[in-house]
Image (cartoon, rainbow, N blue to C red):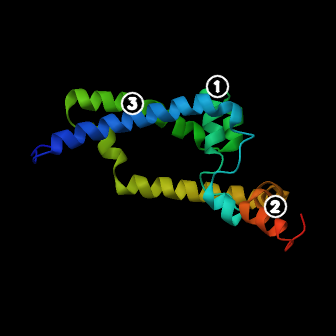
Amino acid sequence: MSRDTPGEPARFSIGRALTGLTALGVLGASRAYAPFATTGPVLCPFHGVFGLPCPGCGLTRAFCSLAHGDVAAAVGYHALSPLLFLATLGAPLVCVYELARRRPSALTRALESSALGWGIGVVFGVHHLLRTALWAWDGTLLHDYVATSWSHALLTSLGIIAG
C-alpha cells in the first residue's frame, strides 16, 4: 500500500477489522456450539445431497473439541484442524498488528501467495482422498455418510430404497 488510491486505507481497515471479528466469531461459536456439534442435523450441502464427505467435513466438530481443549477428539474429526484452529486464533492478533501499522505484514503477504494456496489445496485434497478411501474400506462411508444424507432419507421415504 505504498501508493494509496482513494478509499484504499478505509478498505484495508474495514477488511482487517472484519477478518479479526470473523475469526473471533468462529472461536466463540466453536465454544458455544460444542454441546450440539455431534447430535445436530447434517448441515453440509455436499454431504446432504451426495452422501459423501466434503474436504471440510468434521471441521465444525473438531473446532468445537479444540475450543474445549480436546485435541485428540479434534484430530479424530479432522487431522488438519489443529493447524486451522491455530491460524484462526492468530488471525485477530495479526489484524490488530496490521491495523496499528496501517499496512499488511510480511506474514499476510506470504499467506496471500498463490503457491501457498495451491499447497494448502493439495494437502487438503490428499487428506480428503486418503480419509475417504479409509472410510470406504471400513464401512464408515456407507453407514455414517450415505445413510445420513438428505437424498438417502428422501429415497427411503419414497420407498425407492430400503431403509
Q: Secondary structure at mark 2?
A: helix
Q: CA distance from mark 1 to mark 3?
A: 19 Å
Q: Is residue 132 above or below residue 68?
A: below
Residue 40 image position (x, y, % from top left): 71, 42
Q: Name the residue furthest right.
A: 162
Which residue is drawn at the image coordinates 37% and 38% (left, top)?
19
Q: Earlier in the sequence, mark 1 or mark 3?
A: 1
Query: Pointer 1: what residue?
Result: 68
Residue type at mark 1 is His
Residue type at mark 3 is Pro
Residue 149 image position (x, y, % from top left): 74, 59
Residue type at mark 2 is Leu
Q: Secondary structure at mark 1?
A: loop
Dot label at residue 142 = 2
Dot label at residue 92 = 3
Q: CA distance from mark 3 to mark 2?
A: 39 Å
Quadrant (top left, top right, bottom left, bottom right) of the N terminus: top left
Dot label at residue 150 = none
